[in-house]
Image (cartoon, rainbow, N blue to C red):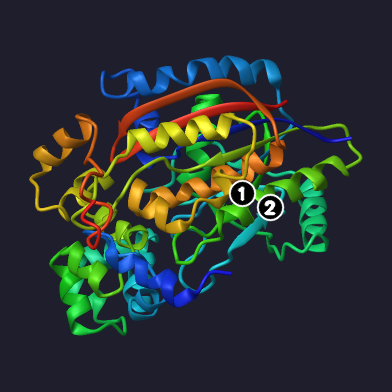
């Protein structure tokens, strides 16, 4: 049977991808950020996941204002890299796992999560930067990816509790897939950042680190109860992306073991957080 | 469930922030769709060749068009723009998020970047207008 073996959380700042693509990762500005991913790259090379359910948000790339799905799951065999306004990132296209994706999609719908199904899509930095952080610059990504896009742009996004429960439902779906697959769930985005208005540049390291701690601890219901207004006030207008981490955390169950933790300010306008967790 | 009126009302209590609500999304629909069109290289070329002619093809208000032409991103936000869509405009200009976002703060590019390297803007006093915290 397929099994969820680990969860990864990471920010997905576009400038991180640009730094790698332009050979700047070793520069003093960037080196401390990337150093925090060295451990993970060695770990994931050993773990060799077959499939990653990659929870991310599209940044006005595949989805414009015409259609705004709250939760959408990619069920295609492949995904192109989109042109976000400066040409596509020079990274490999992304291979999907259509069999598992459709299995999860069907299971989630029966489990009362009314998913939007995507059969064709190009993916943006929200999905490609986490792959770059974990795997560097290979000729082909060494893992198949099931993109799971969450609307965190147009209000209201889904509640933290809903995201958590979606993660629980994903875990049930994965566990009922007959093929023997090593599956990871990644939650991406965050941490504190605000990209708009006079308050832009807000960073709340204290709040972020409390969040990292709570993500790594046994679930007591507190994380999933954080209301949107708290993310907005405490972590900036774009900190709301952290609800996507809760999908990953929900998929891992009540107790987790934290294998790795990294926090760095800044990457561009953003506080970067990173966790590797195992179900315990 | 949450009361949607109360939920939305709280957003107005955050200093220096325009939360992208349905109201703003409706007001800014064409401004954001215009910006989205710049994801295509051919449209970027047409926009760069004659900004006014290109933007006049879109059913936006004159205020919205002028705010884009002026690259006045705070004004764009006020008129329903969303930063991820507006990013297509400043990316076409060759600006990074760091450079473009800084223009909304009233700080110079250098001062804004220095603030970020020093740990960013403190949340103290930036959480709530009403509660002054």
Q: Is residue A18 visible?
A: no
Residue B108 numbered mark, or none: none
Which residue is most to the front? B131
> Is mark 2 in CB contact (under 8 Å) with mark 1?
no
Mark 2: which secondary structure? helix
Horizontal side of residue B22 vs B46, given as left or right = right
Mark 1: which secondary structure? strand
Residue linked to disc 1: A79
Q: Is residue A149 above or below residue A24?
A: below
Q: Is residue B127 above or below residue A218?
A: below
Tell me which chain the residue with mark 2 is part of. A
Tell me which chain the residue with mark 1 is part of. A
Query: Splitting the image into 4 quarters, where does residue A216 fall?
Result: top right
Residue shown at 25% from the left, 58% from the top = B131
Residue linked to disc 2: A166
Residue shown at 31% from the left, 56% from the top = B87
Question: How far apart are the alpha carbons under marks 2 and 1?
Answer: 23 Å
Q: Is residue A185 visible?
A: yes
Which residue is most to the right? A178
Horizontal side of residue B93 vs A225, given as left or right = left
Q: Position of residue B30 (x, y in %)?
A: 35, 78
Q: Is residue B115 above or below residue B108?
A: above
Query: Splitting the image into 4 quarters, where does residue A141 fall?
Result: top right
User: Dot 2, how many residues are within 10 Å of its Cα: few (below 14), some (14-19), or many (20+)?
Assistant: many
Query: Splitting the image into 4 quarters, where does residue A71 fall?
Result: bottom right
Depth order, front residue of B124/A63: B124
Horizontal side of residue A160 vs A235, given as left or right = right
């Amino acid at each position: 049977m397929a099994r969820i073996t680990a969860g990864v959380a990471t920010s997905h700042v576009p400038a991180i991808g640009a730094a790698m693509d332009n050979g700047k990762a070793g520069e003093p500005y960037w080196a401390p950020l990337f150093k925090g991913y060295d451990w993970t790259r060695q770990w994931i090379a050993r773990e060799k996941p077959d499939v990653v359910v990659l929870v991310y948000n599209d940044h006005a790339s595949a989805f414009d204002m015409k259609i705004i799905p709250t939760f959408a799951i990619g069920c295609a065999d492949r995904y192109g890299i989109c042109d976000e306004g400066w040409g596509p990132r020079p990274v490999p296209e992304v291979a999907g796992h259509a069999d598992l994706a459709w299995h999860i999609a069907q299971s989630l719908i029966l489990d009362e999560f009314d998913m939007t199904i995507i059969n064709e899509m190009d993916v943006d930095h929200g999905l490609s930067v986490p792959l770059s952080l974990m795997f560097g610059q290979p000729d082909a990504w060494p893992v198949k990816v099931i993109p799971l896009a969450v609307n965190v742009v147009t209000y209201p996004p889904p509640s933290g509790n809903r995201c958590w429960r979606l993660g629980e439902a994903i875990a049930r779906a994965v566990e009922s897939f007959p093929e023997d697959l090593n599956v990871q769930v990644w939650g991406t985005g965050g941490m504190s950042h605000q990209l708009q208005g006079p308050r832009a540049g807000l960073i709340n390291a204290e709040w972020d680190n409390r969040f990292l701690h709570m993500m790594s601890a046994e679930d007591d219901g507190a994380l999933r109860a954080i209301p949107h207004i708290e993310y907005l006030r405490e972590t900036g207008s774009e900190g709301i992306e952290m609800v996507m981490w809760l999908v990953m955390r929900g998929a891992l169950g009540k107790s987790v073991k934290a294998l790795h933790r990294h926090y760095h300010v800044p990457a561009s306008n953003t506080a970067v957080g990173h966790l590797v967790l195992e179900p315990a | 469930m949450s009361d949607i009126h109360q939920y939305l009302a709280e957003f107005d209590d955050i200093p220096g922030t325009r939360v992208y609500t349905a109201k703003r999304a409706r007001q800014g629909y064409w401004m954001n769709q215009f910006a989205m069109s710049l994801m295509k290289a051919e449209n970027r070329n047409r926009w760069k060749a004659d900004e006014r002619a290109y933007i006049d093809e879109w059913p936006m208000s004159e205020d919205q068009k002028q705010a884009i032409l002026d690259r006045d991103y705070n004004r764009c936000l006020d008129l329903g723009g969303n930063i991820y869509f507006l990013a297509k405009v400043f990316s076409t200009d060759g600006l990074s998020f760091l450079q473009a976002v800084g223009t909304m703060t009233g700080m110079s590019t250098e001062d804004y970047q220095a603030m970020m390297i020093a740990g960013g803007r403190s949340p103290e006093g930036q959480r709530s207008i009403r509660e002054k915290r």
